[in-house]
Image (cartoon, rainbow, N blue to C red):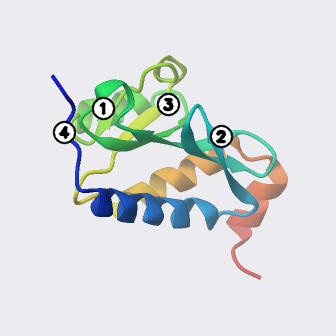
Amino acid sequence: MAARRRAPNLEEAIVARLRALCLAFPEANERISHGSPTWFAGKGKVFAMLDDHHHGANHLSVWLPAPHGVQASLVEAAPERYFRPPYVGPSGWIGVVLDARPDWTSVEEHLRDAYLHVAVRRLRERLLSGPK
């Protein structure tokens, strides 16, 4: 069965908003990794990876690292919104579905949590201290 794809302009708008949210974090940068836009905390670790219908999935999503236990509680509470992504799911990452009506407040909170989870102390402190 072929994956359903949304209109390209809608997906482009979703990716553009995701990109803007990710790049708002201190020293965040975007690179292509495994064929998808991926956001890094400084020169360090990945805090967000776009999943553009990976392996025929019928959704556009973002994969995020999360502390132990978060994945299970989110997937159990809202399986239509969260999932265990392939490859990185066993390490506790969460998949957040970005459909036609993403809950952008929630997406932004998850991005922030993911960034704080992987960023070095200097970048975490910069984010937590707010704008100067």
- The one nearer the camera, 117 or 8, is 8
**Mark 4 or 2, closer to the camera:** 4
Residue type of the residue flagged with mark 4:
Arg
Which labelled disc corresponds to residue 4? 4
Which labelled disc corresponds to residue 32? none
Q: Give the quadrant of residue 51.
A: top left
Residue type of the residue flagged with mark 1:
Val
- Secondary structure at badge 4 equals loop
CA gap, disc 4 and disc 1: 22 Å
Q: Residue at x 73, y 63 (%)?
A: 26
N-terminal label among 2 and 1:
2
Instruction: Relative to 49, say whether 76 is above or below.
Output: above
CA gap, disc 3 and disc 2: 11 Å
Residue type of the residue flagged with mark 3:
Trp
CA gap, disc 2 and disc 1: 21 Å
Residue at numbered disc 1: 75
Mark 1: give few (<14), some (14-19) or many (20+) Cα within 10 Å. Answer: some
CA gap, disc 3 and disc 4: 24 Å
- Left or right: 43 as drawn, with respect to 60: right
N-terminal label among 3 and 2:
2
Instruction: Relative to 9, say whether 38 is above or below.
Output: above
Q: Are marks 4 and 2 in contact (CB under 8 Å)?
A: no
Residue type of the residue flagged with mark 2:
Val
The N terminus lies in which quarter of the figure? top left
Residue at numbered disc 2: 46
**Mark 4 or 1, closer to the camera:** 4
Q: Residue at x 69, y 64 (%)?
A: 128
Across and down, in percent, residue 115 comes to: 63, 50
